[in-house]
Amino acid sequence: MDNQQFIALRCQACGGRLNIPKQNIVDQGEGSFTITGNDTFICKHCDTSYLPKQSLERFAPSSIGGVTISGNVGSTISLGSINTSITVGGRIVDSDVVEE
């Protein structure tokens, strides 16, 4: 079993998430990390390469805050991972429940 731990860092080119093995980075403080060793890491979202001694910042998942959708929707709306409830037509709907 692989017990390797990763730190989520932010790609400077596209803002995507880079999962870098913990043993390949040094914490510089203030959310900044430096890549160590001889490995090159490539962003899977935009193919940007990160070489040893380059600095990256921690990836911080963003909050979308409140979302308002008004009018009639004739198709499925996907919001991705939701950690809260959704209000539809004045009713609170659990994010795991699909209403017909």
Image (cartoon, rainbow, N blue to C red):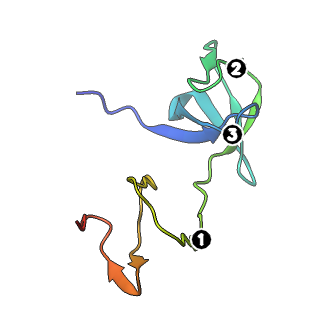
Contact between labelled residues 3 and 2, with CB atoms less than 8 Å apart: no
Indicate the position of residue 1 as horizontal and vertical percent values.
22, 27
Kind of element beneath mark 3: loop
Q: Which residue is at a point 46% across and 56% down the rendered structure image?
A: 79
On the image, numbered disc 2 is attached to which residue? 48
| Neighbourhood count class around disc 1 (C-alpha, 10 Å): few under 14, some 14–19, many 20 upward | few
Q: What residue would you read off at disc 1? A: 65
Closer to the camera in the image, 14 or 92: 92
Q: Position of residue 25 (x, y in %)?
A: 62, 32
Whole-Å distance between the Cαs marked 2 and 3? Answer: 11 Å
**Dot 3 crowding, Cα within 10 Å, few <14, some 14–19, many 20+:** some
Q: Are marks 3 and 1 in contact (CB under 8 Å)?
A: no
Seen at 42% across and 52% down, the residue is: 78
Q: Residue at x 55, y 41 (%)?
A: 8
Tell me which amino acid carries mark 1.
Gly
Report whether 88 appears left or right of 32.
Answer: left
- Quarter of the image where one finds residue 70: bottom right
Please give the residue where the numbered disc 3 appears in the rendered image.
15
Q: Quadrant of residue 52?
A: top right
Is there a contact, CB below 8 Å, between mark 1 and mark 2? no
**Can you give x and y, in whole percent of width and height, for residue 51 in the image?**
72, 17
Q: As shown in the figure, which amino acid type bears the numbered disc 3? A: Gly
Q: Nearer the viewer, mark 1 or mark 2?
A: 1
User: Above or below — where is 41 with respect to 68?
Assistant: above
Of callouts 2 and 3, which one flags the residue occurring earlier in the amino acid sequence? 3
Q: Position of residue 94 (x, y in %)?
A: 30, 73
Q: Amino acid at mark 2?
A: Thr
Residue at the bottom extreme, as displayed: 90
Q: Earlier in the sequence, mark 1 or mark 2?
A: 2
